[in-house]
Image: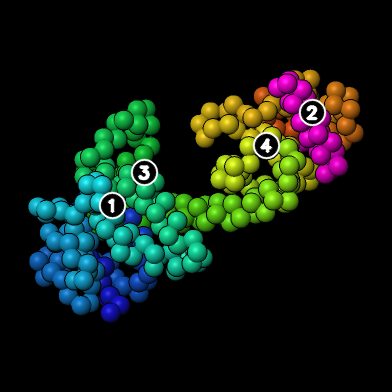
């Protein structure tokens, strides 16, 4: 039965019930959010979903709390907050409602749970100390959500609700953007895989547009690839491929002689008409045309192979 009410606790709000509300309001846009601790509201009923309050976890009764003794935990024994419980039971429906392709549902559901939901769960349960973020502690998502609470001497009785609804809108933007980015990476992976097949044994991977490429290159085991070219706005770019997820070391750098040069100076140094830019860090260059960028890529490959020999 479609709920008429989404019930969570009143008073100060935290990231877990705000994020839960993002998921539930997407699925049940006509339902009214009720923030209360009144016993008659936090008791399960057919017309409501209750979360982060009520002292019970019962998916069939649609109550998702985690503050009680014997609170639910993941298979790896990490604790759930209301967000994790709501995501567990409603996450796939949320992704479907967001237009995620069926073949990507499981992958995105699992990734979002691990990278976005779990950290919120751990912080809410005190299992993760946000102080480990160091100087960025005040910029963690749970901390930022809590800055939207009304100040201690706010007397307007509607201030808490306004703060909660404001936090809900901001949280919604982060959830939607995170999921959209994950979906885009999976779409990119398919395009990059096609390009890898087309490239064959070439050291140069040509893509139809700028997109995330490294995960697909690693997944395909395309260790022979050294550079990526693609159109970019009004020109073309030539990019190196990082060796690891962390750090900036590349499989191959662009030629030393190109570093920091632009336009005529770069044309002279490279011998390629239409060369317009090379970063001083030698990880990206640009040219006016596809022909020019491919010529630069071929030179970069030759120099990289020669230096490795």
| Neighbours of disc 4 within 10 Å: few (<14), some (14-19), many (20+) | few
Residue 279: percent from left, percent from top: 71, 27
Would residue 81 appear left or right of 297 to someone viewing this image?
Answer: left
The answer to whether the residues at label 2 and label 1 have Cβ atoms under 8 Å apart is no
Residue topped by disc 3: 141
Residue topped by disc 4: 224
User: Which tag is nearer the camera, tag 1 or tag 4?
Assistant: 4
Q: Quadrant of the C terminus?
A: top right
The answer to whether the residues at label 2 and label 4 have Cβ atoms under 8 Å apart is no
Residue at x 29% of width, y 31% of height: 131
| Neighbours of disc 3 within 10 Å: few (<14), some (14-19), many (20+) | some
Residue 32: percent from left, percent from top: 29, 70
User: Which tag is nearer the camera, tag 2 or tag 1?
Assistant: 2
Sequence-wise, which precedes: disc 3 or disc 1?
1
Q: In this picture, which residue range is highlighted in magenta?
A: 286-309
Question: Does 193 appear above or below 24?
Answer: above
Instruction: Report, in whole angstroms, how far the alpha carbon at label 3 lies from the one at label 2.
Output: 46 Å
Residue 288 belongs to magenta span: yes
Instruction: Report, in whole angstroms, how far the alpha carbon at label 3 lies from the one at label 1.
Output: 11 Å
Of 53 and 254, nearer the camera is 254
Instruction: Report, in whole angstroms, how far the alpha carbon at label 1 lies from the one at label 4.
Output: 45 Å
Residue topped by disc 1: 16
Sequence-wise, which precedes: disc 3 or disc 2?
3
Of 97 and 241, nearer the camera is 241
Sequence-wise, which precedes: disc 1 or disc 4?
1
Residue topped by disc 2: 302
Instruction: Report, in whole angstroms, how far the alpha carbon at label 4 lies from the one at label 3.
Output: 40 Å
Outermost bottom residue? 1
């Amino acid at each position: 039965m479609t709920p008429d009410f989404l019930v969570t606790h009143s008073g100060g709000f935290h990231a877990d019930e705000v994020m839960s509300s993002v998921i539930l309001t997407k699925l049940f846009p006509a339902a009214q959010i009720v923030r209360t601790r009144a016993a008659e509201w936090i008791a399960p009923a057919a017309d409501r979903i209750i979360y982060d309050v009520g002292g019970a976890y019962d998916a069939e009764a649609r109550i998702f709390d985690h503050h009680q003794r014997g609170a639910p935990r993941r298979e790896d024994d990490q604790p759930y907050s209301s967000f994790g419980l709501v995501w567990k039971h409603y996450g796939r429906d949320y992704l479907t409602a967001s237009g995620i392709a069926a073949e990507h549902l499981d992958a995105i559901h699992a990734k979002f749970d691990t990278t976005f939901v779990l950290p919120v769960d751990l912080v809410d349960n005190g299992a993760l100390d946000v102080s480990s973020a160091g100087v960025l502690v005040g910029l963690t998502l749970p901390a930022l959500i809590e800055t939207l609470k009304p100040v201690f001497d706010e007397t307007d009785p509607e201030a808490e609700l306004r703060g909660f609804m404001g936090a809900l809108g901001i949280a919604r933007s982060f959830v939607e953007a995170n999921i959209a980015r994950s979906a885009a990476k999976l779409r990119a992976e398919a395009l990059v895989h096609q390009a890898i097949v087309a490239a064959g044994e070439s050291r140069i991977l040509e893509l139809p547009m700028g997109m995330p490429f490294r995960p697909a290159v690693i997944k395909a085991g395309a260790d022979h690839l050294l550079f990526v070219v693609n159109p970019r706005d009004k020109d073309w770019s030539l990019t190196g491929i990082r060796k690891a997820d962390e750090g900036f070391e590349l499989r191959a750098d662009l030629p030393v002689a190109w570093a920091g040069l632009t336009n005529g100076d770069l044309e002279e140094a490279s011998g390629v008409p239409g060369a317009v830019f090379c970063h001083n860090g030698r990880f990206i260059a640009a040219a006016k045309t596809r022909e020019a960028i491919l010529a630069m890529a071929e030179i970069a490959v030759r120099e990289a192979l020669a230096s490795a020999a």
